[in-house]
Amino acid sequence: MKSLKDSLESKKLLTVKSGTNIYNVVCYMAEHNIGLVPVLSDDGKLLGVFSERDLVRRVISKGLELKSTVVDEIMTKDLVLANLSESYEQCLQKMKERGTRHILIIENEKLIGILSLRDLLEMDLHVQRETIEVLHNYIYSK
């Protein structure tokens, strides 16, 4: 079974720095085709995340200026976190409880990656396929 660590190995961690204006954050997200980006302090501490949803609900709907508003003012600070040692099922449960599509993976209090609902569902699908194959082999090997 693929672990969280295995899933993160193929993903580059893309972040923005605290103090970046919304215009630059949105351009960065568009350039990298991502819907959520972690916001880090100068020393690498995770401060929050900025998402497409934040853009719509906290910037556009309030008429804020993209170039004069910094990400720190409107980012989401109530984060959904998982330790690298947790299972994908635990991550899915946390995401379900909080109604989110992304989970931040930490190790030793340091952000090491982000997994989306799609990533975790692919892991679950792989496990289900393996289970079906094992059961099929068991049933028809007699």
Image (cartoon, helix red, strand yellow):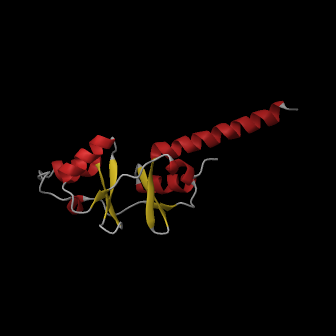
Q: In which quadrant will I find the C terminus?
A: top right
Residue pictured at 75% horizontal, 38% vertical: 134
Would you say 46 lies left or right of 66 here? Answer: right
Q: Which residue is farthest top?
A: 140
Residue pictured at 45% horizontal, 55% vertical: 113
Residue pictured at 76% horizontal, 33% vertical: 136
Q: Position of residue 86 (x, y in %)?
A: 56, 60
Q: Where is residue 33 in the image (x, y as percent from the top left)?
A: 33, 40
State the image quarter where residue 127 is shown. Answer: top right
Examine the rendered structure and indicate whether residue 49 appears above or below residue 140: below
Front residue of this view, candidates 41 and 57: 41
State the image quarter where residue 128 is shown. Answer: top right
State the image quarter where residue 58 is shown. Answer: bottom left
Front residue of this view, candidates 89 and 40: 40
Q: Which residue is farthest right?
A: 142
Q: Where is residue 83 in the image (x, y as percent from the top left)?
A: 51, 62
